[in-house]
Image (spheres, rainbow, N blue to C red):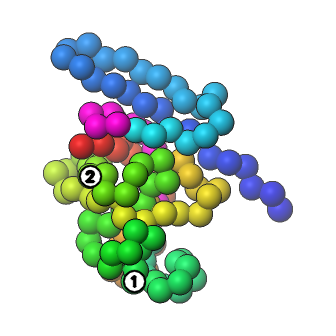
Amino acid sequence: PETKPEPAPVVKTYANTQSTSTTLASKKQAPVATTGKIMTVTVTAYSSTPDQTSGNPFITASGSRVHWGTGEANFLPFGTKVKFPDYFGDQVFTIEDRTARKYSNRADIWFPSRGEALQFGKRTLRIEVL
């Protein structure tokens, strides 16, 4: 069965005390966020099990070893620091991995165990690009 692509994230930019909202759903490619952007995205979780990764399950697409704080987001460059303030508070994640192309508009967080990843599940969260 053919899967539908996910809708693009909604990007909100906050400057001074004014806010603007831009919906990117009409664009055909995943957005590239810049520092200071806050987006609402689908966030899922993964662990280092062979069926959830390609190649070595402990090495990210950028070549680093997975660790707590590893994140995936195809719409952000490697090395980008992000937060998910509504769920993880001030915890900083670094984009070091990539997800399957059909999930280009979602973020993915690495967890040490499959059980923890399953417990996190799939959520809609704000992501703040630092």
Residue 110: mark: none
Left or right placement of residue 32 versus residue 101 in this view = left
What's drawn in magenta, residue-wise? 34-44
* Mark with earlier residue (1, 2): 1
Instruction: Locate residue 95: give its quadrant.
Output: bottom left
Q: Nearer the viewer, residue 117 or 34?
A: 34
Q: Residue furthest top?
A: 18
Q: Give the residue at mark 2.
A: 81
Q: Nearer the viewer, residue 87 or 76?
A: 76
What's the residue at 26%, 52% (across, down)?
81
Tell me residue 76's x, y (percent): 42, 49
What's the residue at 20%, 15% (across, down)?
17
Residue 14: within the magenta?
Answer: no
Judge whether 40 appears above or below 73 on screen: above
Q: Tell me the quadrant of the picture where the C terminus can be found.
A: top left
- Report if residue 115 is visible in the image: no
Residue type of the residue flagged with mark 2: Lys
